[in-house]
Image: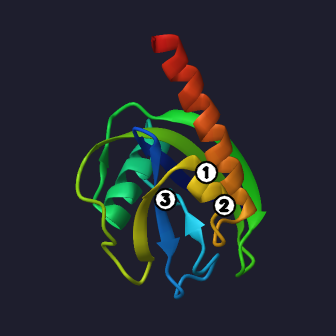
Amino acid sequence: MFVVNVEAAVFNDDKWLIIQRSLKEEHAAGELSLAGGQVEDEGNSSDILERTAKREVFEETGVIVKDTLLYVHSTSFISNSGKKVVDIVMLAEYENGDSHSKSEDEVTDVFWLTTDEIMNHVNTGPILRESIKRAHLLKEKLYTKMI
């Protein structure tokens, strides 16, 4: 059985919303990450991944994203506590809100960073690097078509 986790690659112009995970977190403590969390049991439901991403971004950072979220990619991994996790990344556009850590037990800090800043940061792990690379490519592809 897998835990399903959803993260949002939230962009605003040329920057991405990035959190630094609390040192109290059981998995990837202190690392940079996208905002996100576990899918909750809602019974029969539609758009559960999108709702989860939007809820988690707001709960962790105070940021509200626009309604349209797009699939970026998925991965699987085993957490530090041995849980099998399927992680889904969604592309989301910033709508409003002042970004800040709403729970220091989960999030130490919140940043708006460029793709290059994320790729070169000492606390960026391989999963975040791959997620940002793919989200950046999808965002560029979408905006190139709109021009």
Quadrant of the snapshot with the N terminus: bottom right
Callout 3: helix, strand or loop?
strand
Considering only vertical position in the picture, is 89 above or below 113? above
Image point 37% across, 48% down: which residue?
54
The part of the image, by quadrant, that contains residue 101 is: bottom left
Q: Do residues under tags 1 and 2 come within 8 Å of each other at their CB atoms?
A: yes
Residue 69 appearing in the image = yes
Task: For marks 1 and 2, give the CA distance.
Answer: 6 Å
Instruction: Point out the tag, 2 or 3, that comes first from the N-terminus.
Output: 3
Task: For marks 2 and 3, give the CA distance.
Answer: 22 Å
Q: Nearer the viewer, mark 3 or mark 1?
A: 1
Q: Do residues under tags 3 and 1 come within 8 Å of each other at their CB atoms?
A: no
Considering only vertical position in the picture, is 147 above or below 25? above
Quadrant of the snapshot with the C terminus: top left
Callout 2: helix, strand or loop?
loop
Image point 71% across, 58% down: which residue?
127
* Residue 134 placement (x, y as % from top left): 66, 39
Residue labelled with disc 3: 36
Residue kind at label 3, given as amino acid type: Gly
Q: Nearer the viewer, residue 62 or 124?
A: 124
Residue labelled with disc 2: 120
Residue kind at label 2, given as amino acid type: Asn
Instruction: Point out the tag, 3 or 1, that comes first from the N-terminus.
Output: 3
Q: Nearer the viewer, residue 94 or 82?
A: 94
Residue 48 appearing in the image = no
* Residue 8 placement (x, y as % from top left): 49, 49
Considering only vertical position in the picture, is 65 above or below 129? above
Q: Nearer the viewer, mark 2 or mark 3?
A: 2
The part of the image, by quadrant, that contains residue 99 is: bottom left
Residue labelled with disc 1: 116
